[in-house]
Image: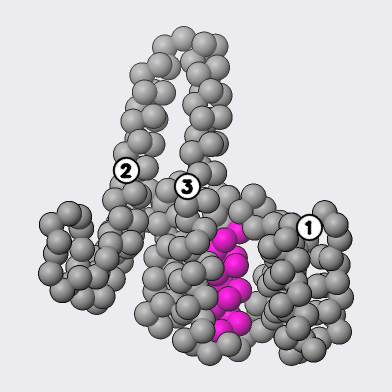
Amino acid sequence: MTRHELKEQLQHDAFRDNVDTALDYFTTHREQVIRWVAVIVVVAIGVGVAYWVYSHQKTSRDRALQAALGIADAPVMPQSDGFGLSFPTLEKKNAAATKALSDVASKYANTEQGDIARYYLAGLQASENKYAEAEANFKAVADSKTAVAGLAKVGLAELYAGEGKNDQAQTILEKLVANPGPMVSRAQATIMLANVLKSKDPQRAKQLVDSLKGPTETPAVTEAANQVLQEIK
């Protein structure tokens, strides 16, 4: 995989196509957290104020994250159309997005919103060939306890594969296959592992792909598996 291909894949696979899914997941689980805290309030009289503060802070985190992602997704236009945020150049847009995402990641470290911001920041840095910074941020999120950790592991594996560090990419993906998460399924991790191994160990790559050809797999998984199989042949 060339560096250009790496940037394209990271832009479309690793963070842009998945961030909405991540946000939907966090929104769903936020409701569960609120219900759980409500039970605690009933049991422990007098902590209602603390819960209000928690809810307010979480709303602030959500808004800060959405604002940062809005900058990252803003269009590049020589002249503003007056209907929304835009930037005259890609360089200015990326600089603003880097600052906004960095601020959220720093201010809300060790939270779901902070990890999403850091994950998105890593993808942006990879697209700008800032591989050392991208690696550090992907690692930080990959080591977290939030659901986005799985996506960060995928991003880190793709980063390593793009730099020719296939052994490191393989190690990460093998762990994901063994322990998939809510954001990365076993089938997705298996396909990515087969893709990394298709040149190094085509026989094992084929075995991995063949394991995904059961009737229970989705059409998207089957199509992706067949594509890898064709590339092996």
Q: Residue at coordinates 47% horizontally, 52% vertically from top-left?
A: 20
Q: Write down the region rendered in magenta.
A: 150-162
The stretch drawn in magenta includes residue 182: no
- Report whether residue 76 is seen: yes
Left or right: where 80 falls relative to 14: left
Q: Residue at coordinates 34% horizontally, 49% vertically from top-left?
A: 66
Give yes or no for contact between labels 1 and 3 (Cβ–Cβ under 8 Å). no
Q: Give the number of the disc on residue 217.
A: 1
Kind of element beneath mark 2: helix
Q: Amino acid at mark 1?
A: Glu
Kind of element beneath mark 1: loop
Residue 147 x/y as whole percent: 58, 50
Q: Give the number of the disc on residue 63.
A: 2
Q: Amino acid at mark 3?
A: Leu
Which label's residue is closer to the chain start, 2 or 3? 3
Kind of element beneath mark 3: helix
The stretch drawn in magenta includes residue 160: yes
Image quarter of the C terminus: bottom right
Which residue is tagged 3? 23
Left or right: where 75 falls relative to 105: left
The residue nearer to you, when weighing 171 against 161, is 161
- Report whether residue 133 is seen: no
Which label's residue is closer to the chain start, 2 or 1? 2
The residue nearer to you, when weighing 77 against 174, is 77
